[in-house]
Amino acid sequence: DPGGEVPIGRSVQRAGVGEGAIRRCGSRRTACSEAQGHGTRHGQSTEPRHSAISYALHASGKSVTIVKIGYIHWPFCIAKCPYCDFNSHVRKTAETAVWKDALIADMRHEHVQANSEEPLTSIFFGGGTPSLMPPSLVAELIAEADRLWGFDPAVEITLEANPSSVEAANFADLAMAGVNRVSLGVQSLHDEALRFLGRLHGASEALQALEVAQRHFKRVSIDLIYARPGQ
């Protein structure tokens, strides 16, 4: 239901300058917009200040650098992990053309709202499971972001992925689309823990996906969940 319950690409994130990283601030439906002068407490919405583009402030000595980052949300998953409180929904299919038009419309709106000539230093595809997006759609969204804002020479374009063999098969095409960093939701290398967490992959499959990712992307990171019950 792309016109219903799911907000499109509207969570504000913060980036660490020089790290190329985006820090999640609670749920992806929470705006962490201190940089815009609209600070929030954890878990509180700041409507209508949700935005696909955010300015992040970084103090280095006496200087302050303003960077601009983009966040693109793909809320669909094959299954809902029991620990997940993000804006994600189980769907067998998604109306890709409808979502493409909506995401591009949102990006163009944010471009007008941003009113800045600063190029993007980072794009983060989160979810949901953005590695389920068709690589052609990822390429179109990256191209539109480049057309609207332009990219910093060292731009980092990250996409979250599950470490499954099905999704790993798309890594080559995602790299061709412009993604240069992938973040794998490994979560654990113990099969029993993965079953407890509701993950669909096993430890060996995760290691194989990591190997495939390292062949195609310059930067690869993994997520691990610690302090589980009984750990």
Image (cartoon, rainbow, N blue to C red):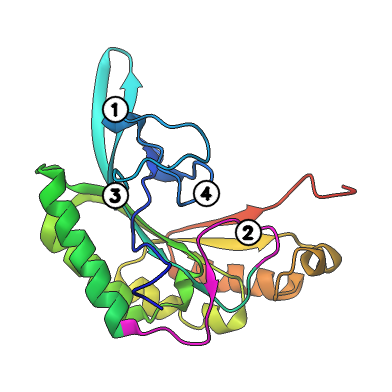
Alpha carbons under labels 2 and 1: distance apart: 29 Å
Alpha carbons under labels 4 and 2: distance apart: 9 Å
Q: Which residue is mark 3?
A: 51
Q: Residue at x 52, y 41 (%)?
A: 43
Q: Amino acid at mark 1?
A: Gly
Alpha carbons under labels 4 and 3: distance apart: 14 Å
**Of the residues under marks 2 and 3, which one precedes in the sequence?**
3
Which residue is situated farthest in the top direction here?
62
**Of the residues under marks 4 and 2, which one precedes in the sequence?**
4
Q: Which residue is mark 1?
A: 37
Q: Residue at x 74, y 59 (%)?
A: 188
Alpha carbons under labels 4 and 1: distance apart: 20 Å
> Which secondary structure lies at badge 2?
loop
Instruction: Tell which of 181 and 95 is nearer to you.
Output: 95
Q: Position of residue 12 (x, y in %)?
A: 36, 46
Residue 27, which numbered label? 4
Q: Position of residue 68 (x, y in %)?
A: 25, 43
- Tell whether position 44 is magenta: no
Marks 3 and 4: in contact by CB < 8 Å?
no
**Of the residues under marks 4 and 3, which one precedes in the sequence?**
4
Q: Main secondary structure of the magenta part?
A: loop
Q: Which residue is mark 2?
A: 84
- What's the magenta region? 81-96
**In this view, 152 is above or below 142:** above
Q: Amino acid at mark 2?
A: Cys
